[in-house]
Image: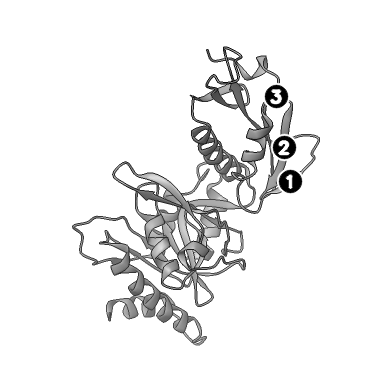
Amino acid sequence: MVVAASKLATPFCLFFESHGVRLKVETNLPSILNAIQHYLPPTSKLGDFEDADDLFSIVANNEGGQPNEEYTYCLYHGGNLLLHTTSPDLALDELESRLHAAIALRSLPWLFVHAGVVGWQECAIIIPGRSWSGKTTLVAELVKAGATYYSDEYAVFGQDGYVYSYPRPLALREGQRGRRVKRSAEELGGRIGTDPLPVALIVATRYDEHARWQPQVLSPGQAVLRLLENTIDAIRRPQCAISTFGRVVTNCLAISGTRPSSDQVAPYLLALCDQVSMVWRQREVKHPDKILASLFCSN
């Protein structure tokens, strides 16, 4: 039996803030509350606020009331049921995803873009794309090759056009069913970046096992569109998004195309980023987009 959140007592709660968004999570089991703290978004700060921008609840229910009976878990957003399951891990995973989305929607003036991000030579490589496009796999390979980890799910842009770290654990898919397994950057032999970075390279790509790596150079306008396509809440904030992304693409190179395995592509992207960074240091350059395109085509 599914019971509405308003009908059950949820005496255990925590408040946290991330990117200016205040959220409350509550439950009726202390063990669930302890577990929730491991699922909070990166950079979260616990607090004790008088109000919150949004509320999520996990309600555990033991219908028979016997200690050895299986619990069911209901995840609520406000009073709306999102999930009913016998798996606490599934409820917590879904809660984590919802918390990320709630922050992405409300985090003014930040812009959250579905993208993987790594740092290289004091610049950022952005890999925009939705789930199942292969961006986490490519990010993991870049980190293994020496890049600094920033995010595998969201590129967080400030109005200055720089990208900021959002270092949640990488959610790598394993097996035929694509079960997600969390891995830290340290487990992959890498490290987490903390400083905001200018963008040197935008790679709009998806994995195809039969693909040949023959990407095309995108114009600045096309690059902005690729970012907009993957931006949370772009419809309600078009002027902010266009203005911010205009700054992002000013001196970066954007490429697009299907790709083969990550281990074939990662070294190429790092070498290309090296060349873009080198051009940036030539302050006398008046048309960086043309020079960057010529650098790419020469490889």
Residue 117 sits above or below residue 34 on the image: below
Residue 97 x %, y %: 52, 40
Question: From mark 3 to mark 1, how far is it between C-alphas?
Answer: 18 Å
Is 76 or 212 nearer to us in this picture?
76
Q: Tag 1, which secondary structure?
A: strand
Tally of numbered tags: 3
244 left or right, relative to 203: right
Mark 3 element type: loop
Q: Residue, x 61% and y 45% (percent of image)? A: 38
| Three-letter code, disc 1 | Leu
Quarter of the rendering containing residue 100: top right
What residue appears at the point 72 percent right and 37 percent down from the top-left corner?
14
**Which mark is drawn over residue 14?**
2
Question: Disc 3 marks which amino acid?
Answer: Thr
User: Which quadrant is home to the C terminus?
Assistant: bottom left
List the residue tagged with mark 1: 46
Please, is residue 262 above or below residue 65 in the view?
below
Q: Nearer the viewer, residue 277 or 150?
A: 150
User: Is label 3 in contact with label 2 (beta carbons under 8 Å)?
Assistant: no
Q: Mark 3 or 1 closer to N-term?
A: 3
Q: Which residue is mark 3?
A: 10
Of the pair 291 and 81, the residue shown nearer to us: 81
Residue 149 in the figure: left or right of residue 179: right
| Percent of width and height locating residue 70 | 52, 21
Q: Residue at x 28, y 44 (%)?
A: 176
- Alpha-carbon span between mark 1 and mark 2: 7 Å
Mark 3 vs mark 1, foreground winner is 3
Apparent side of residue 270 relative to residue 283 in the rendered image (left or right)? left
